[in-house]
Image: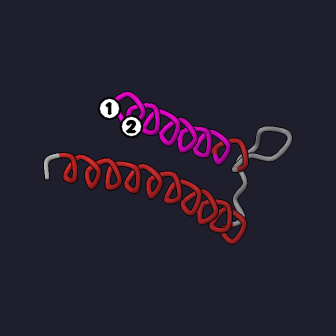
Amino acid sequence: MTDKELSECYFRGTSRAGRVMEELYEDLHDSLGNPIDDIDLVSLKVNDAIKKVRLEVDIIKTAVEEKSKKDDHYFY
């Protein structure tokens, strides 16, 4: 993996994580734009968003780990 490919992976992952947060903001409001105040529903939506963001972060971490391993083997 090149530095450019790794950077693109970072961009994709952070962009998707950003979209998740934007969607969460929208999901925390009803169709009239009023904030949802049901703690159970809000907790469910927040926990779902956290799982999605963690997945994107894990993908980023995996990519840099793979690149690091390949770079290490290059020198041997």
Judge by depth and name the residue closer to the eye, 27 or 36: 27
Percent coordinates x, y for residue 66 in the rendering: 35, 54
Specify the amino acid type for callout 2.
Leu
Q: Residues within 10 Å of mark 1 (few under 14, many from 20)?
A: few
Q: Tag 2, which secondary structure?
A: helix
Report the residue at 61% width, 39% height from top: 19
Specify the amino acid type for callout 1.
Asp
Q: CA distance from mark 2 to mark 1?
A: 5 Å
Which mark identifies residue 28?
A: none
- Please, is residue 25 above or below residue 5 in the view? below
Answer whether labels 2 and 1 touch (C-beta < 8 Å): yes
The N terminus is located in which quarter? top left
Which mark identifies residue 3?
A: 1
Side (left or right) of 15 relative to 62: right
Report the residue at 67% width, 67% height from top: 44
Report the residue at 50% width, 42% height from top: 13
Would you say residue 35 sits in the magenta stretch?
no
- Please, is residue 68 above or below residue 2 in the view? below
Report the residue at 22% width, 53% height from top: 73
Percent coordinates x, y for residue 7 in the rendering: 38, 32
Judge by depth and name the residue closer to the eye, 11 or 74: 74
Start and end of the magenta stretch?
1-24
Side (left or right) of 35 relative to 31: left
Q: Main secondary structure of the magenta part?
A: helix
Judge by depth and name the residue closer to the eye, 35 or 4: 4
Q: Which residue is mark 2?
A: 6
Would you say residue 21 sits in the magenta stretch?
yes
